[in-house]
Each structure stands twice: as structure tokens, then as C-alpha cells.
Amino acid sequence: MSPFFRLQGRFILIFLVALRGESRYLELREAGDQDPFLLLGAHLKRELAGEPLYRRALRCLDMLSLQGQFTFTADRPQLHCAAFFISEPEEFITIYLDLVSIDCQGGDFLQVFDGWILKGEKFPSSQDHPLPTTERYVDFCESGLGRRSIRSSQNVAMIFFRVHEPGNGFTVTVRTDPNLFPCNVISQTPNGRFTLVVPHQHRNCSFSIIYPVMIKISDLTLGHLNGLQLKKPVAGCGGKGDFVELLGGSGLDPSKMMPLADLCYPFHGPAQMKIGCDNSVVRMVSSGKHVNRVTFEYRQLEPYELENPNGNSIREFCLSAL
């Protein structure tokens, strides 16, 4: 089973509980009998490179990691629908509205959101995203096809929609573009390695892993200017400046997670922490005065590691927060 399949299965179950309860889970199981979650593996991305545009039907509740054209057609009133899109960390997502046939006056809607929302929590958080929350939504019923394309600010985006009349629906095309300095990221896989670089920008960047993980930081560069290391800030992590924090929690929004560790000063060499939370985040706060960089590896914790914590471990908080 591919890592992305496991991510989707885990995420979909959380989403279903939040959205509608067990009845929606039964609906998904019925859909799963008809070729469940097909074409979601990362290896298929490589196979489709250079091939004609991939097309398939969009489900009321869906998650996609492929570029292509996707069409939703209601076969009955569909009132609580969402499609989640995720790409590689170093990519933006652009959603093109090709064709829309919905009844806005009758209560239908189609909204594109720059990021993900789950149980009222947003990723990226309002603190980390460059736009106000209201500007992260594009509502077809308000803008029409005057705005045919929406590009995300990170590697995730989503569509909310409601369609009452059978036969109505919409078609979207999803494309990805390179992001030279990815800031906010949700990892598709439970294991990996990443370098987060913030070059002279006053912004906060979060790398989110929707698994309990072991995080090992191998390199942290803070407060460098023209290749020279500045003096350590007197105020430390609690004051204004540049630092990295490790967060853990059960939701999506990093601003609502528990701060587990602060890293205030540059270092070279391994530093690791076990985070037994549903969601683990490496977050960099940057003043914009320097080029900041952090390199880290992460891997999903085995069940026995959650049952028998040892070393640098945060488990009790996460269990009590579930």
C-alpha cells in the first residue's frame, strides 16, 4: 500500500467523523466497492508524466494528488461535499474552472479555498498565510467565471460544493507549478527529509506531518547575513527574532497546537524528538532580516514506540487531547 493511500485513508476517516458521522462512512464504503481511491499512488505521477491529460469523475468526498481534469455530476442531492488536492512540497496548485452548471439561487455553491479546512481548523493557519482568511475563498456564485483560475499559496487546496439537482455539476482542471521556496507544506508521506528555507522574508512557515513521528533535525541556520553568523539574540525564542518550534496536536491549525520545543540558536548535528500526536509540525518564524534554514528527517512511529515512550518524547499531552 502506498504512503499516500495510507494518508488518504487516515485523513478521510477523520474528515467523515467531523462532517457527518457514521452515515457518511457507510456512503464512502459503498463508493469504495467501485474501485476505491484509484490512481492515487506517487508512482502513477511518474507514469503519467508527458501523457495526455488525465481525466476521471470527482466524488462528493475526494482527495487527489494528480494533475488532470475532474468532473462532478450529481446523481442525487449532494449537500456536504469537499475535494482535497495535494501536490509535492515544492509545487503550487492551480485550479481552473472549466465548466460550472449549478443553481446558486437554489442553494448550490462552489467555493475554492487556498489551503485545507477540517473541523473548523485551517492549514496554513491565519498567522502563517500571506492572505486574510476572507481572501482565501473564491466563491463561484459571487464571482462567476470572471475568475477562471485560482492558484494556491502552498501544496494544498480544496473545493467545497453543494449541488441539489441531479445532472448538475462542474468540471475543473488541476495543474501544478514549481515553488522555489515552499513555505507551508503538508507532507504526502509519513517518512521523508526536507529543507525549509526562508530567504529574507518576514513570514512564518509550517511543515505538517499528519502522523505521530520521530523528527531528527540535522542542521539549523538562524541569523546569518552575508554568510556571517550574527550574535545570539538576547531575547531568545520568546522575543522578536528568528527561531524554529516543534508543535503537536490533533487538528490541522498549527496556531492551535501545543508548543513542544523551541530552537533559538544555530547548530549542526542531530537533535531529535518523538511526537506521538496525530499531527506533528516543524514551524519556522522569520523576521525577514536573515536567510534561515532548517533540515530535518521524519519517520512514522511504530505502534510499540507509542506504547513505550523513551528518550525525548511527547505523548501524554497528545493522548489527553484526543
Image (spheres, grey):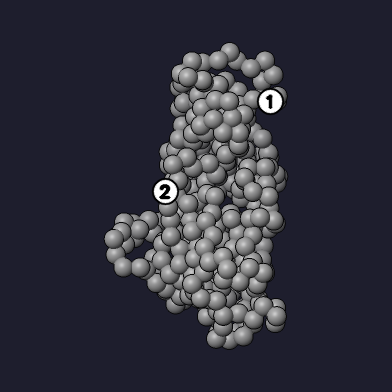
Residue 178 badge: 2
Decide: few, some or many residues near mark 2? Use Cα within 10 Å; few <14, some 14-19, many ≥20: few
Question: Dot 1 lies on which element?
Answer: loop
Please report the residue visible at 62 percent of the width from the left and 45 percent of the height from the top: 130
What residue appears at the point 43 percent right and 60 percent down from the top-left corner?
175
* Residue appearing at x 55%, y 57% in the figure: 157
Left or right of residue 160: residue 177: left
Image coords of residue 16 (percent x, y): 62, 65
Residue 18: x, y in percent?
Answer: 67, 62
Q: Residue at x 50, y 24 (%)?
A: 221
- Residue under numbered circle 1: 240
Where 50 falls versus 280 (above or below)? below
In the rendered structure, which amino acid carries the disc numbered 1? Lys
Question: Residue furthest toward the top?
Answer: 231
Look at the picture and state if 58 lies above or below 10. below
Seen in the picture, residue 246 relative to 97 is either above or below; the reply is: above
* Secondary structure of the residue carrying numbered label 2: strand
- In the picture, residue 248 is in which quadrant? top right
